[in-house]
Image: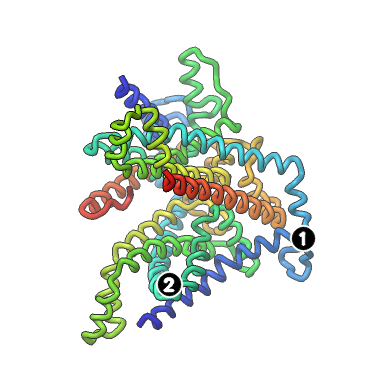
Amino acid sequence: MNKKLRLLAYPYSVWMGIFIVIPLFLILVYSVTTGDIHDASSLKLSGESYKKVLEPIYLNIIKDSFVLAAASTLICLLLGYPAAMIISNTNIKYRGLVLVFFIVPIWMNFLLRTYAWMSLLSPNGFLNRFLMWLGLPKLELMPGQGAVLVGMVYNFLPFMVLPIYTVLSKIDKNVLEAASDLGGNKIVTFFRVVLPLSVPGVVSGITMVFMPAVSTFIISGLLGGSKTPLIGDLIEQQFISSRNWHFGSALSIILMVMILISMAIMSRIDQNNAQEGRKV
Amino acid sequence: MMKVAKKIYMGLLYLFLYAPIIVLIVFSFNESKSRGHWGGFTLKWYAELFRDRQIREALYYTLLVAVLSTVISTIVGTLAALGIHNMSKLGRTVVLNINNLPVLNPDIVTGVALMTLFISMGLELGLVTMLIAHVVFSIPYVILSVLPKLRQLNKHTAEAALDLGATPSYALRKVILPEIMPGIVSGALMAFTLSIDDFVISFFTAGTEATNLSILIYSMAKRGVKPTINALSTLMFITIVVLMLIINKKSDKGENLLL
């Protein structure tokens, strides 16, 4: 029976070959060639697309995407960690409710959530009317990087809180008691016990925020205007309007590599932490 | 003191999370077209929403693709998971690594890669290509939620069924399938939500032929204010909240699917 069941994997393997492997292979091929994409015989090996990536305007866009994504990840971590701690210390009776209220906003379509911020942040929007009413100066966030940052933090904050909460809620309360019995005050206990134990949650939170943030083109498209394109906008342009698939493919490969490297670094941190834990 | 500070902190975070949603809902009842000005209560944007042919069509495409891709990816994914579970270790590792690619890759890369494939194959972008794309990114999630259930399965129950004279297909239907059902159901739910919520991959694979709700909202939002989007958001949000509450209530007895 096992042998027969194994046959069931073959059709899907073919499907994966056609719809997962070949598309990525095509992107790789287009990124290192030039020529007419509709005529395979005209394709010539060339590093032109990657050379174009190194031009200052494009390098700057890549740098901006990286910096904005890193900044929003950091803000999510600083805002989300205390929230996760507060939730995990909430009375079990209300904890489910507190948590659900954190999750409900992500049930709303991503685009609509971002669109909602347009009405809040636009020059004559809600936030500025409120500030004017208080007699404060207007904020010129939208369109611009400030608004993009707000949009990223807003959209991805729950993805930081949830994994950290999961790890924190699993910490054995006896460990914390032991730490305080052994003379550790609250601050020492936090830095020497709670924080190291929560690293796996922090690591997956960082990955879950950084990855969509660095590759987004919706948030920057709606809140950033045309002044502050990110690498995602650039890829979209190359494939949709300017039709330079070679350059777009090179950018996609660079985005993939950026994400792979950051994921590798994060899993390294996770492993090192686990080893150190064992030593102690 | 600490307690009050914690409550204020959480209160501010909730304000941050809900302010945009509340503003959207409130302004869906706003008589005036302006985003910052309250011109009195009205339901006209809702009425306009139901008259709008474009929106009705987009809703139809969204639901059609979601239902079809859920059905296809659940069936194909479950069968594939059965096959993968019975593969040799090496084969399984290779297949699972490739299967994980759409999960790990950013949506935009999956989107442009599929678009490149479709156009290179000479396919016209439209409903069919969008449906294929949704099946492509949904199957991995179905497999990932069915496989753990297969691993928990007791090998001997299926063997016992065969020893007692069941045909292999009978044993599959009556012994294995009921055991892995929770995995199949959560995979199907995942596939459905992912499909309904997807924008990026649809955007690249649907062309100009089949506009689903996400694509329509994106183009409407880019073009500028239209209070009908507020009305649409409000209705979609309420539908999702009600749906999720029902699912949560139903799954209360067992494990909580969403948390």
Depicted A156 relative to depicted A134: above or below? below
Nearest the viewer among A36 and A192 is A192
Q: Position of residue A116 (x, y in %)?
A: 46, 36
Amino acid type, residue under disc 1 in the picture: Thr
Residue B180: image quadrant is: bottom left
Amino acid type, residue under disc 2 in the picture: Ile
Quarter of the picture holding the C terminus of chain A: top left
Q: Is residue A255 left or right of residue A45?
A: left
Q: Position of residue B147 (x, y in %)?
A: 38, 66
Pointer 1: what residue?
A: A34
Q: Is residue B12 left or right of residue B34?
A: left
Q: Is residue A7 left or right of residue A56?
A: left
Pointer 2: what residue?
A: B84
Quarter of the picture holding the N terminus of chain A: bottom left
Depicted B174 relative to depicted B120: above or below? below
Nearest the viewer among A188 and A155 is A188
- Name which residue lies at 40% across and 72% down: B85
Q: Position of residue B199 (x, y in %)?
A: 50, 51
Judge the density around disc 2: few (<14), some (14-19), many (≥20) Cα neighbours within 10 Å.
Answer: many
Judge the density around disc 1: few (<14), some (14-19), many (≥20) Cα neighbours within 10 Å.
Answer: many
Q: Position of residue B51 (x, y in %)?
A: 42, 47
Tag in front: 2 or 1: 2
Residue B190: image quadrant is: bottom left
Depicted B32 relative to depicted A226: above or below? above
Chain under disc 1: A
